[in-house]
Amino acid sequence: MNRFHRFLALSLIVSIAGSALPLPAQAGVVGTEALAAASAAPADRERLAALLARADLRAQLEAKGVRPADVQARIDALSDEEVAQLAGRIDSLPAGGDVVGALLFVFLVLLVTDLLGLTKVFPFTKPIKR
């Protein structure tokens, strides 16, 4: 038992002494582009959530068999760059026009995330069991 106590005391001394060592810190200059991109991400997420809250878009999604809650979960799972790309793509669509194109884009986003294994919405993306 005496050896165990020595080993325990030595281990505690080393761990306490090691925790007092200073850790290295790094600092850098943040560019304007990085700051603008970081502040734009929450606004883009809010815009996508507002778009998903529209009754006509929800009706179209439900007609295609996609639950709006699944779409919202996938939007929440997107990175900030993907959200900015999606919001930019929606901005480039014609106003009041091509709803089919927007739905196709949403379908493609859902399909890609399903193929990557992030979600399980479409049954035809599951592997065939042999």
Image: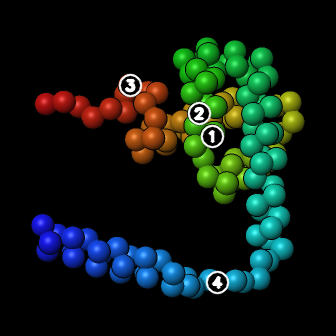
Mark seen at residue 73: 2
- From the viewer's perspective, is residue 37 above or below residue 32? above
Measure how far apart labels 1 and 4 are at the Cα level. Answer: 30 Å
Q: Nearer the viewer, residue 107 or 47?
A: 47
Location of residue 24 (image quadrant): bottom right
The residue to which callout 4 is attached is 26
Name the spot of residue 11 as percent of width and height, x first.
29, 75
Residue 123 disc label: 3
- Callout in the foreground (3, 4): 4
Q: What element does badge 3 sit on? A: helix
- Three-letter amino acid code at disc 1? Asp
Q: Is 77 placed left or right of 6 in the picture?
A: right
Which corner quadrant of the image does residue 45 belong to? top right
Q: Please, what secondary structure does the residue beneath circle 1 have? A: helix
Q: Nearer the viewer, residue 37 or 103?
A: 37
Residue at 58%, 43% in the rendered image: 77
Q: What secondary structure is marked by label 2? A: helix
Q: Which residue is mark 1?
A: 76
**Disc 3 residue type?**
Pro
> Could you tell me which quadrant the N terminus lies in?
bottom left
Q: CA distance from mark 2 to mark 3?
A: 18 Å
Side of 19 where 123 appears, left or right: left
Q: Earlier in the sequence, mark 3 or mark 1?
A: 1
Q: CA distance from mark 3 to mark 1?
A: 22 Å
x, y percent for residue 119:
46, 35
What amino acid type is highlighted by mark number 2? Answer: Ala
Distance, label 4 to label 2, CA atoms, is 35 Å
- Does any portion of residue 93 appear in the rendered image? no
Taking the spot 43% from the left edge, 30% from the top edge, the residue there is: 120
**Which of 6/73 is in front?**
6
